[in-house]
Image (cartoon, rainbow, N blue to C red):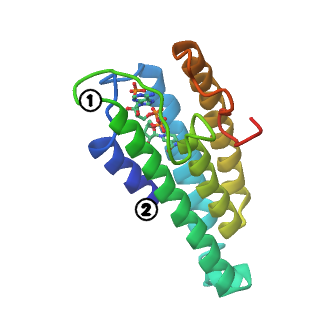
Amino acid sequence: MAHFIKRELETAFVHRFSHGTMPLMNVFKNSFHYHMLSGLNLAYWIYGPSTAQGTPLAAKLGSPFLLSLLTGIFLFAELSNLSTHITLRNLRPPGTRVRRVPYGYGFDLVSCPNYLFETIAWVVIAAMTRSLASVLFLVVSTGQMYLWAVKKHKQYKREFADYPKSRKAMIPFIL
Ligand SMILES: NC(=O)c1ccc[n+]([C@@H]2O[C@H](COP(=O)([O-])OP(=O)(O)OC[C@H]3O[C@@H](n4cnc5c(N)ncnc54)[C@H](OP(=O)(O)O)[C@@H]3O)[C@@H](O)[C@H]2O)c1
């Protein structure tokens, strides 16, 4: 819930989008992704009767320390994701469609650190819940974000002749 509330708030108060709308088909594609694959799928398996019969998460994970560690990594990933979105916002003066090369936290390693940190957050959710439903959501989301990252990375290289050569698309030093 916190993850998605954060995203709603970012959409309203952080992002400076260049388009006020999106293709109609995206409404169906995105709604399926978020309401079915995430909402219904995760809710059914994680909050459904079979798991709601009172095993606290710490007990399921076998250790309160592990729960705290995973929660810490989740918070790190979410705050890092927010930081990258603020960096992108600050590249564009209000009311314009200007695009610039982002630098700084995360961006010195990859073109789309926002997707990298988002992936880390969902890895934590999968590890915490130990549910195949979470793993399925993680795989589909990461696959989609990786394809976006490759596209954005290529666009940066086309657009800016001085784009940093060592920067990868989404996975530092690898991809
Ligand atoms: N990684 C995630 O956190 C994630 C994953 C899936 C979906 N989403 C959601 O999808 C929406 C878009 O987010 P996103 O993560 O995919 O990021 P994004 O669309 O790549 O970028 C976010 C914002 O930064 C602007 N931007 C990107 N690169 C820029 C540059 N070089 N110079 C100036 N402005 C730039 C974008 O403008 P344009 O409109 O011009 O692109 C957009 O307004 C958000 O609502 C987000 O919550 C996020």
Query: What's the residue at 53%, 44% (across, down)?
Result: 114
Q: Secondary structure at mark 2?
A: helix
Q: Can residue 146 be seen here? A: yes
The front one of 118 and 164 is: 164
Q: Image check: 80 left or right of 12?
A: right
Q: Quadrant of the C terminus?
A: top right
Extreme residue toward the left, this view: 95
Q: Amino acid at mark 1?
A: Pro
Q: Are marks 1 and 2 in contact (CB under 8 Å)?
A: no
Q: Amino acid at mark 2?
A: Ala
Distance between the alpha carbons at the discs numbered 1 and 2 = 29 Å
Tag 2 residue: 2
Mark 1 element type? loop
Compared to residue 22, the image places residue 124 above or below, namely: below
Nearest the viewer among 68 and 4 is 68
Query: Residue 31: x percent and y percent?
Result: 47, 37
Residue 124: x and y in percent read: 64, 62
User: Measured from the top left, where is residue 152 in percent x and y?
Assistant: 57, 25
Q: Quadrant of residue 88?
A: top left
Residue 40 lies left or right of residue 95; in this view the side is right
